[in-house]
Image: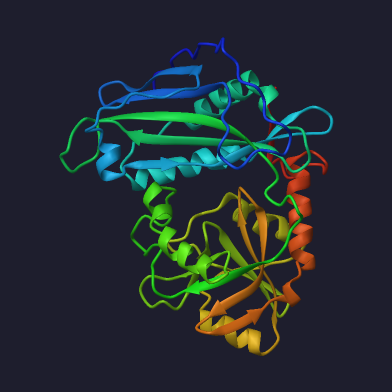
Amino acid sequence: MTTYQLEVIENTNKKEKPVKDQVPFGTTFTDHMYILEYETEKGWYDPKIVPYGPISLDPAAMIFHYGQTVFEGMKAYHTEDGRILLFRPEKNFERLNLSSERLSIPAIDEEQALEHLTQLIKLEKDWVPKTPGTSLYIRPYIISTDANLAVGPSQTYKYMVILSPVGSYFPGGLHPVVIHVEDKFTRAVKGGTGMAKTAGNYSSGYQAQANAKKEGNADVLWLDGVEKKYIEEVGSMNIFFKINGEVVTPELNGSILKGITRMSIIELLGTWGITVTEKRVSIDELYEAYEAGQVEEVFGTGTAAVISPVGELNWKGKKMIVNNHEIGELSQKLYDTITGIQTGKIEDTLGWTVEVK
């Protein structure tokens, strides 16, 4: 792969930084963004950091018509001693390429992507918020740009990175949420694109989520698309259960996203001597365990929330109340440990953080 010199065009019209926590998720963006171009004959080329702003695309650009796109999500954290840390960013770029492979998008150079990301964050270091619970959200993504209505992979692409300071995901503290078990709509099926971070996987869930919220639920628990029997994900997160002392999570089956937080929790629990069983978990099996008084904790995991405890599951008119709507001891410990490592409050003995120097 040809190496191109990174060009930096500084923004001379800097924006005013947002006030501490007063930042709705994903609505405020920094002064600069990163762009990398692709053509079949050249490969990836012309890396640039440029002022944040609109991009120009042909109305026939394939992204608008066939949704050939992938994205990632990660965060930069400000430590109390003034460092800026990334959490396992190499895993995000590895997963980006896995998603790209599924969507027939050419792979990027993962080492170069991380190097250029650190250059972008260094330029935007004053945008990394310092208030506890806040972070700089990082959104790398690739779109297909060919002006062509033929059905097939694009021959040109743009890889971009934008940055957004975000407030605390839980400004009022961690509170378990109410979840509807979805048995009508399907998130993904084995052999589809469920294991990839691609746009359609998320927008196809909007209707089910809106219906659930009308009934007082925060989100939905997705079941498999074939039998509507096996648990897959919760909202846009992976899910874990503590049942009769055992930690269980649905196994990766081709329709479940390989979460970075999921992976980290499994590895972290392993260092604590707790084995996580990855297997198919049916909703019937879960309800039977609940009836037997064995469902101790339920929590979703993902970049945005890290841990999102579940206090109630609604399934076919039946309510499963988890831990009296209170966060479980293990869920709290996992949240405190991972966020502690991310923000430098806890020593990173696992080599998960990368300092932006």
Asked whether the viewer can see residue 254, the reply is: no
Place residue 227 in its image quadrant.
bottom left
Q: In which quarter of the image is the C terminus?
A: top right
Q: In which quarter of the image is the N terminus?
A: top left
- In this view, the residue in front, 52 or 189, is 52
- Residue 8's x, y, as percent? 52, 12
- Residue 347's x, y, as percent? 82, 42
Place residue 242 in its image quadrant.
bottom right
Asked whether the viewer can see residue 269, the reply is: yes
Whether 119 is drawn above or below 80: the answer is above
- Residue 223's x, y, as percent? 46, 71
- In this view, the residue in front, 357 or 62, is 62
Residue at left offset 47%, top offset 60%: 256
Whether 2 is drawn above or below 109: the answer is above
Count of labels in the image: 0
- Residue 251's x, y, as percent? 52, 66
Residue at left offset 58%, top offset 81%: 286
Whether 139 is drawn above or below 52: the answer is below
Is 82 on the left or on the right of 32, as rendered? right
Q: Residue furthest left?
A: 150
Q: Residue furthest bottom?
A: 292
Is 333 on the left or on the right of 145, as rendered? right
Residue at left offset 73%, top offset 66%: 274
Whether 346 is drawn above or below 40: the answer is below
Residue at left offset 20%, top offset 42%: 152
Coloring applied to the structure: rainbow
Q: Residue furthest front?
A: 214
Is 132 on the left or on the right of 234, as rendered? right
